[in-house]
Image: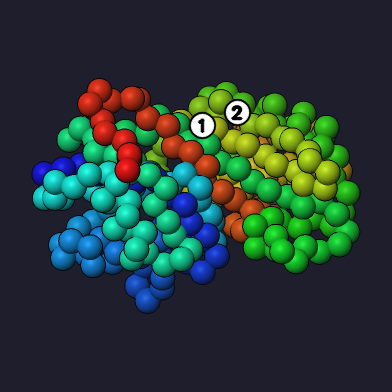
Amino acid sequence: MATVKLVLEYDGSRYAGWQRQPDQPTIQEAVETALFQLTQQTVTVVGAGRTDSGVHALGQVVSFRIDRDWTPHEWTKGFNARLPEDIAVRSAAIMPDAFHARYSARGKLYEYRILNRPERPAVERGYVWHVYKTLDPDAMRQAASFLVGSHNFTSFEGTLTENEDPMCHLQQLSLDQQGHLIVIHAYADRFLKHMVRTIVGTLVEVGRGKRTPDSLVEILAAKDRTAAGRTAPALGLFLMRVDYDSPAGSLTDRP
């Protein structure tokens, strides 16, 4: 049995998230369907992160075990010939048996994109949150600094979750401004449901002057979702990268 790792890129606009759901298209369903078409085997694929409906990815990682002795190039080519146009395999690797896309992950990088200008976007409308009122990036950066570190992030967790561990080590929460585009990067060992989007929504409220930067300290301490701001729209969020320890003997994708 081979353990295969794939790095996926996808536009999540028309999908109800990563995880299979009844009567709704999902990324997992599309990948498993392509895998069946490729191998005639029914295999469950595991994703590193269960991205929500409408969330995009440039570096989602999936893994599966299968009785096929194929090269990474054969996996990449085979999948890309069968996946929908809005999902692509960027690379493949044959991994040690113990590798698991979710449980072996050491860190994840998310990016959130805000277009801050009065005029609505046309070309990028599905990939940014359009905030038409002027934001204060310096205030947002100051607020973000209070969230970096190991904290209980219950106040930033979505409802209806089965998660029992609210502790996350948020190693990076940075904000860069490129003209009218504000890009927020969040890197942590793990993220709670809706955590990045709730952080972004709260930072935008700070940027609009509705909250003070130091109010983030009180929000963290509250451990109450109602203390934080709105959940930012899914369309501006991208899963950029998932990090792992480098296992000896892994075979990366080479033609």
Of 13 and 24, nearer the camera is: 13
Query: Residue placed farthest to the front in the image?
Result: 255
Question: Is 251 placed left or right of 168 in the picture?
Answer: left
Residue 250 lies in quadrant: top left
* Helix, strand or loop at mark 2: strand
Residue ID at (79%, 41%): 178
**Amino acid under label 2?**
Gln
Residue ID at (75%, 43%): 182
Question: Is 158 placed left or right of 115 in the picture?
Answer: left
Q: Position of residue 215 (x, y in %)?
A: 75, 34
Distance Cα–Cα, label 1 vs label 2 = 7 Å
Q: Residues within 10 Å of mark 1 (few under 14, many from 20)?
A: some
Q: State the colouring used for the structure image.
A: rainbow
State yes or no: discs 1 and 2 in contact (Cβ < 8 Å): yes
Of 160 and 113, nearer the camera is: 113
**Amino acid under label 1?**
Ala
Q: Position of residue 243 (x, y in %)?
A: 42, 32
Q: Which mark is residue 89?
A: none
Q: Position of residue 192 (x, y in %)?
A: 49, 43
Residue 183 in view of the camera: yes
Residue 211 in view of the camera: no
Can you identify the residue that label 2 sits on?
172
Residue 94 lies in quadrant: top left
Residue ID at (74%, 35%): 176
Q: Which mark is residue 188?
A: 1
Q: Residues within 10 Å of mark 2 (few under 14, many from 20)?
A: some
Residue ID at (61%, 58%): 235
* Helix, strand or loop at mark 1: strand
Q: Position of residue 147 (x, y in %)?
A: 64, 30
Q: Is residue 75 above or below residue 221?
A: below
Mark 1 and mark 2 lie on one chain; the one further toward the N terminus is: 2
Question: Is 230 placed left or right of 177 in the picture?
Answer: left
